Amino acid sequence: MLLYTWKDVERCLLLNKDKLGKDILDIEVYFSEVIIYINNMENKQAVQETLYKIFENKYIQSENKILLDIGTNSYLSIFFETSETGEKSSQIFPLFKNVLYNKSAYEEEMVNQSLPGSPVIAFHSYKGGVGRTLSLLAFLKAWSSLTDNKDSSKLLIVDSDIEAPGLTWLTATGEENPFSYLDLLEVIQGTDDVNMIVELVADKISQMSFKIETDVRVIEHIVLPTYRYVEQLLDMYSSPESIANSYNKKFILGEVLSKLGSKLNAAAVLVDLRAGISEFSAPLLFDPRVKKYLVTSTSFQSIKGTELLLREMNKGLPLKESTILPEIFLTMIPDGMDTTDIISSLIAIYDNNQAENDEYLTDNLVTELPFASELVHLESLKQIMNNLESRDFYKKIYSLVKSNYIYKEDDKDFGVLNDRDEIIKKINNLAYKQINAEGNVAFNILMTSPINNLIKKFKSNIPSTVIMGAKGSGKTFLYRELLRNVYWESFIENMEGIHVNENHHIINIVPILASNNATGFNDLLQLAIEKYNKNTDSDMSNSVWLDNRNEIKTSVRQQYDSLEWKQIWENLIIRSLGLKCDDLSQLDKYLETINRKVVLMFDGLEEIFINTLTSKNEKNAILGLCQELVNELRVKYKNIGCIVFLRKDLARDSIEVNFEQFSTLYNSVELKWSRIEALRLVVWLVSQAVPGYYNEQVKVEEAPQIVIEKNLTRLWGDKLGKATSNEAYSSRWILAALSDFNGQLQARDIIRFLQYATSDIGKTIYEDRYIMPAEIKRAVPNCSNKKIDEVKQEIAALKPIFDKLEHAPEEKKTLPFYNDTFGLTAVEEKLMKQEGYLKVDNDKYYLPEIIRHALKFRYEKGARPKVLSLLLK
């Protein structure tokens, strides 16, 4: 450090406080000298050695002086004195110049305290012109609209921007104000009695009001302008800094504003702070009981300045549920700009002491406010309020205010949870039975988009199609429900809520192959076979689906091309159906004569063909069935259809030419779960487990997002904590935890999550939900562990990759990592990306949450927002 003046020397000593040791009791630095107080002159030499460690060659021990880096003979003399008073206590003042040299910005006991009256909410920015005051006004408008039918709608607005008092001018009436913020500071300077201050000034402040018009009524708020007359502004006597430095008044400003709010019946106090690193703003910025919103644009200077502010404000601020954490409004975002890296850099500052189980606490700290040119040049309060309406800028703040501050009486209690234990057990029981599609509980299947498309596509003609989906996407579940209906027409009618009349049904659903899991619904298989035999006068074997598995396994040992495999499949069908037909043409004609049709069902192919990545014969088997045979059935035969349930990675491995064309052909019926459908599935499952839970007028599958979210809030709360907390939104957090980088969620993972989240009925913490945050957070690692085990079994090529990552040294298991960290080959990378388990962004490698937990990877500072962005994009 270059030392030009005594102040540089003082700063250098303060920055090295940890090195000073117990021998030095206090240091005073003046224009030409430094006085060092020590406990005993015998320790003088040890102190001199400490000074040399700090200043090196700039400290001349023999002459006891510190050389300055300006002029030819500039220095500060050092004098040593003993002190009997002991070490001077190091107080924490809410000022930048004091916080800078302390490890913590806060007195520990204050972090857990609350203000004595109304909450105080402060808006600050490092730079001016980034929308700080506009954000406050949008907050004010949102509050007014959300409380326009309540008594607690009034706010106290304080313009504390002493150098640029914008709110003062916007709310000016033309008459001289009876009181001002500078008046308040001068009154506070004269006394430390908070109650007396409030009694003295409350009546005067109550006279200054302005009105906000909502759709329902006009709401009157109170404003405290910066100044009363210009001379007061230009000839300032008292300031927030001078008050904070006064005896017994370090945090008095926040307390006075809070109690003033209560006295004036204001639900909250909004404060517009001076921009920049200003001691005018510091007493509220460093009061841990005050809620802060830091407003920044995406510009480099604004972001770097905001990071600087956050570093100081987060010193010693524990990252926990009860802490009032500073939040960020990211404004003036250009269209199409990816803000993930900016958000990551800001969130990294909160991560200093972050434990992994508290990672969700930083998920909700940045609110992005899109740029709106209409909001740049505004001249009046009325114009601002009008122009905010319907802007995304305003909608985002409206949503924040609604979620974090407005308490809805009708959401307060939905039943005092007297039946919580019973409901949790019912959900757990259903999820447990359905997890592998083995349950035999009869209930209507959820009408998702792929199923709806399947019905539309084949409502008037017999289906011949391939239904793809990842493992756990619900293929076997759908297979089972088709069997339960016995007839294709019954399936359509049940799904559409039409009365089922089997007397008119002629399209039998016939199992040719089934998954190993089918043993759990063997009675449904037998029923389908029995009905088919009865309707066609056939003698199909009750174990046909099992016999066929063994036959195909035998055929796999030989080598065939795709056309030969097509013939193998055709022969298999003819033998299975138990009719005296030599080929499909004869079968089709016979079915025509008896006025019957069949839909042949194939599932469990991945359990037979386990080497499609490397085996040409297995590839040909899939091609022969899914391309050659399915195409022929669709084109040539009116009475024979088929539904092949195929895991997507098998299709990708096997169809090496024109896979994208094949995928596009069957894309509309591919079992994929969008985020809203995944959430809808949760509501539907709970409604099946708990009759009466869902009592909306619209069916679950047709319910808009707002209805789904309302019912999910009853299930697991709006946030992973109380509704007004900093915690992540429950649904968003759960979706991110269960998704892969292909944007896919699997039905099995969703059901399994419900199973694990309800397996242990924990303590009731919140009365507004059934599943508590602790149970949600415990469920995710369990889902992750199970997911890894399944993927290793199902996609053999991924097993060695996961093993490599799982057994890597702990110090390497950090996200993001780089291409040489684990020695992944190009083929391994491609496979991981293809399956949605790896994402490379700017040469940095990321893993999704669904496998990160099981592999025990940690985040480096600020990396989590990037992963969430990639998962939820």
Image (tube, rainbow, N blue to C red):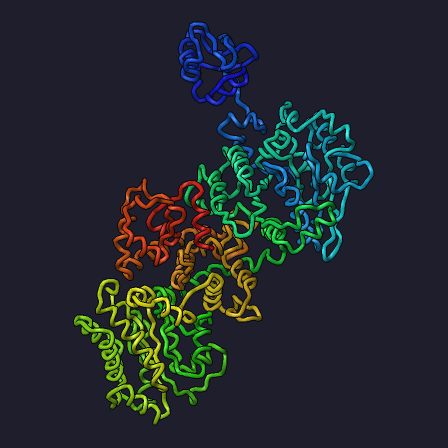
Q: Residue at x 39, y 75 (%)?
A: 481
Whether residue 279 is visible to the viewer of this picture, yes or no, is: yes
Q: In the displayed structure, would residue 359 be above or below residue 54?
A: below
Q: Residue at x 73, y 46 (%)?
A: 381
- Name of the residue lying farthest toward the left: 558
Question: Number of callouts in the render?
Answer: 0
Q: Residue at x 52, y 55 (%)?
A: 717
x, y percent for residue 738: 41, 56
Q: In the displayed structure, would residue 464 be above or below residue 89?
A: below
x, y percent for residue 195: 70, 33
Horizontal side of 205 relative to 598 (left or right) equals right
Query: Who is closer to the viewer here, 522 or 634?
Result: 634
x, y percent for residue 212: 73, 50
Query: Who is closer to the viewer here, 451 or 516?
Result: 451
Q: Residue at x 73, y 45 (%)?
A: 379
Snapshot quadrant of residue 208:
top right
- Name of the residue lying farthest toward the top: 63
Query: Who is closer to the viewer here, 23 or 793?
Result: 793
- Name of the residue lying farthest toward the right: 175
x, y percent for residue 290: 60, 38
- Name of the residue lying farthest toward the bottom: 593
Whether residue 775 is visible to the viewer of this picture, yes or no, is: no
Horizontal side of 556 relative to 731 (left or right) equals left
